[in-house]
Image: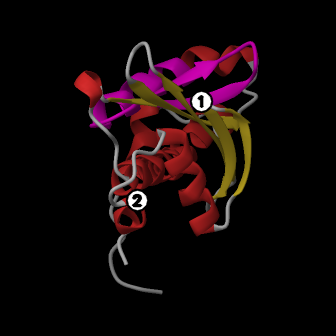
Amino acid sequence: MALSEQFMQEDLHPIDIVEYIAVHHQWDFDRIGDDQISMSVDGQWRTYTLTLAWSAYDETLRLICTFEMEPPKDRVPAVYETLNAINDQCWAGSFTFWAEQDLMVYRYGLVLAGGQEACAEQIDTMINAAVLSAERYYPAIQLVVWGNRTTDDAMQVAIAEAYGRA
């Protein structure tokens, strides 16, 4: 059964749909308020914290996916250079580094102007895209921060396709 079929003929708040998705995937979550939810999603490299918030004023569902990153101060400029290269490859969403919190952040906003409603598949795809993007670029960021690799060199890891099978 498609995720949306659960919500047919119902007018649900976007965060209610996110909560249903979190339950469906058995993710740990905390309903922070009527318009906000936070959850933990395990990836291959680490556990990501995702926060989704609904702004009725902007009619936007905002997703923020974070993971800790504590680069040495001398590597921060290289981190920003790498994030620029990463963002050039992202079709939806973008990465930034919040230095004060030592957090790597992937952000995306689903604009639902004019009273549009999000379906469960859209939100699930949005969440999966955030985690997949974080997973894809995490090794490149690590190589830049801890391996002292150049952005170009590290990005080859992120864009390389695996061939064959193990």
- What is the three-letter code of the residue carrying label 1? Asp
Residue placed under numbered mark 1 in the picture = 35
Q: Give the mark count.
A: 2
**Which range of residues does the magenta coloring cover?**
79-107
Identity of the residue furthest to the left in this view: 114
Residue 72: x and y in percent read 75, 22
Way the structure is coloured:
secondary structure
Q: Label 2 is placed on what type of residue? A: Phe
The quadrant of the picture occupied by the N terminus is bottom left
| Residue 145 point in image, percent of width and height | 65, 32
Between marks 2 and 1 in the image, the one whose residue lies nearer the viewer: 2
Q: Position of residue 81 (x, y in %)?
A: 46, 20
Regarding mark 2 in the picture, which secondary structure is present there?
helix
Between 25 and 136, the one nearer to me in the picture: 25
How far apart marks 2 and 1 lie (CA) works out to: 18 Å
Among the two numbered marks 2 and 1 on one chain, the one whose residue lies closer to the N terminus:
2
